[in-house]
Image (tube, coloured by chain):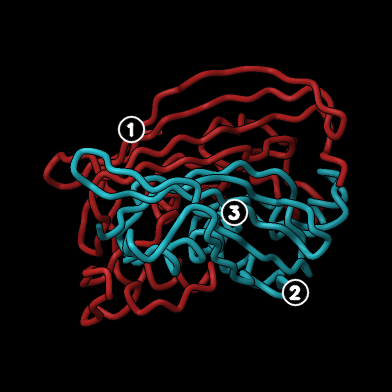
């Protein structure tokens, strides 16, 4: 768990979420989450029917990997809120890097909290996920 | 969507954590104690999304009993895409997941039994250069545990696009 005395507004935490995303990892996520939308695993459907160049990752896979960066930073079981927008698609072969930036340290209902701004970008610097999170910290 | 029983199981949490590339022992080792004080197996922040496994009518899972599936087999699609993306995530051919937000009220642990109810939220439209007219719709799902306590509130935003998104 982060300590209020050890962090300040503007601090960042960065992690590489995945290098060269494999289609097999997308299949793993489909199986674990139960979202079997063919857009994520079925190349023939996705190219011939849906009109995309290839399959692409579930937004929730990118949110899940981004969440790993967040929990590695704030500690297990400390999140109060976590939300994202999916701003661009994630394709097989992508390498994703995620950054959390401390935007505020505050008290609410007797708890010490940190607010984070979150951005995950691909190898071209395009944001694929943007969002925010709030976690409990030690005062 | 309504789910009567979402059994939060250790092996499911382990598989889910693997799929997002997270090897944190708090997701598979019941003897692990985190520096933050968490112990026992807990669920990763986005795990509630896998409640789809426990929704008998979830439309993004092939059904048994000869009901059609829109993915490829002999032909590139088994049937014409249908159904709405709603806010729960994903959708049929033209439906995509636009936003997802979670509020955590209580820790989610292996052994919990959740129930979930979903209500529609706001709906709105927007023009976009990359995909034409966009129709957004929000849905709010409340997950309660075996004691009836609210554990997670999940708000999803789905979008139906006029055409595939230019990348």
Q: Answer few, some or many: residues within 10 Å of disc 3's Cα (few below 14, many 20 plus, some between 14 and 19).
A: many
Q: Chain A hue?
A: cyan
**Up/down of B33 relative to B110, above or below:** below
**Which colour represents chain B?**
red
Relative to B143, say whether A95 is above or below.
Answer: below
What residue do we see at 35% from left, 38% from top? B153
Q: CA distance from mark 3 to mark 1?
A: 21 Å
Q: Position of residue B2 (x, y in %)?
A: 35, 34
At a point 62% along the width and 31% down the height, the residue shown is B83
Q: Could you classify mark 1 by the number of other residues whose Cα lies within 10 Å: few (under 14), some (14-19), or many (20 or more)?
A: few
SS for dot 3:
loop
| Left or right for B42, reference A28 | left
Q: Nearer the viewer, mark 1 or mark 2?
A: 2
Q: Are marks 1 and 2 on the same chain?
A: no
Whole-Å distance between the Cαs marked 3 and 2? 22 Å
User: Where in the figure is residue B120, as x and y percent of width and height?
Assistant: 45, 22
Q: Please tell me which residue lies in front, A20 or A137.
A: A137
Mark 3 belongs to which subunit? A
Check the picture and name the quadrant holding the N terminus of chain A: bottom left
Which is closer to the viewer, label 3 or label 1? 1
Relative to the observer, which residue lies in front, B72 or A42?
A42
User: How far from the left and from the top, in percent, is residue A11?
Assistant: 52, 60
Residue B143 seen from this side: yes
Residue A10 sits in quarter: bottom right
Q: Are marks 3 and 2 in contact (CB under 8 Å)?
A: no
Residue A108 percent across, percent down from the top left: 26, 39
Which residue position is annotated with label 3? A36
Relative to residue B144, is residue B137 drawn left or right? Answer: right
- The residue most toward the left is B147
Chain bearing tag 2 is A
Residue identified by numbered label 2: A20
Q: Which residue is mark 1?
A: B117
């Amino acid at each position: 768990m982060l300590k209020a005395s050890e962090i300040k507004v503007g601090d960042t935490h960065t992690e590489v979420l995945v290098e060269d995303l494999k289609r097999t990892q997308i299949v793993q996520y489909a199986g674990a989450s139960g979202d079997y939308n063919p857009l994520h695993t079925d190349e023939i459907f996705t190219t011939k029917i849906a009109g995309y160049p290839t399959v692409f990752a579930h937004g929730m896979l990118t949110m899940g990997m981004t969440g790993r960066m967040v929990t590695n930073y704030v500690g297990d079981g400390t999140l109060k809120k976590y939300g994202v927008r999916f701003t661009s698609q994630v394709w097989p072969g992508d390498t994703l890097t995620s950054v959390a930036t401390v935007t505020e340290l505050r008290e609410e209902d007797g708890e010490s909290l940190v607010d984070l701004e979150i951005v995950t970008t691909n190898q071209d610097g395009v944001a694929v996920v943007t969002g925010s999170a709030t976690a409990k910290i030690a005062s | 969507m309504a789910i009567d029983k979402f059994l939060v199981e250790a092996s499911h949490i382990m598989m889910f954590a693997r799929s997002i590339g997270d090897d944190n022992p708090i997701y598979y080792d019941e003897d692990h104690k985190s520096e933050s004080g968490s112990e026992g197996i807990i669920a990763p922040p986005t795990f509630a999304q896998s409640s789809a496994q426990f929704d008998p009518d979830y439309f993004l899972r092939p059904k048994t009993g000869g009901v059609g599936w829109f993915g490829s087999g002999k032909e590139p699609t088994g049937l014409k895409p249908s159904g709405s993306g709603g806010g729960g995530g994903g959708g049929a051919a033209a439906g995509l997941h636009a936003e997802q937000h979670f509020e955590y009220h209580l820790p989610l642990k292996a052994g919990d039994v959740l129930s979930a109810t979903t209500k529609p939220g706001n709906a709105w439209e927007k023009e976009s250069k990359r995909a034409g007219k966009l129709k957004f719709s929000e849905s709010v799902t409340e997950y309660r545990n075996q004691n009836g306590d609210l554990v997670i509130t999940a708000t999803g935003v789905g979008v139906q696009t006029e055409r595939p998104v230019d990348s």
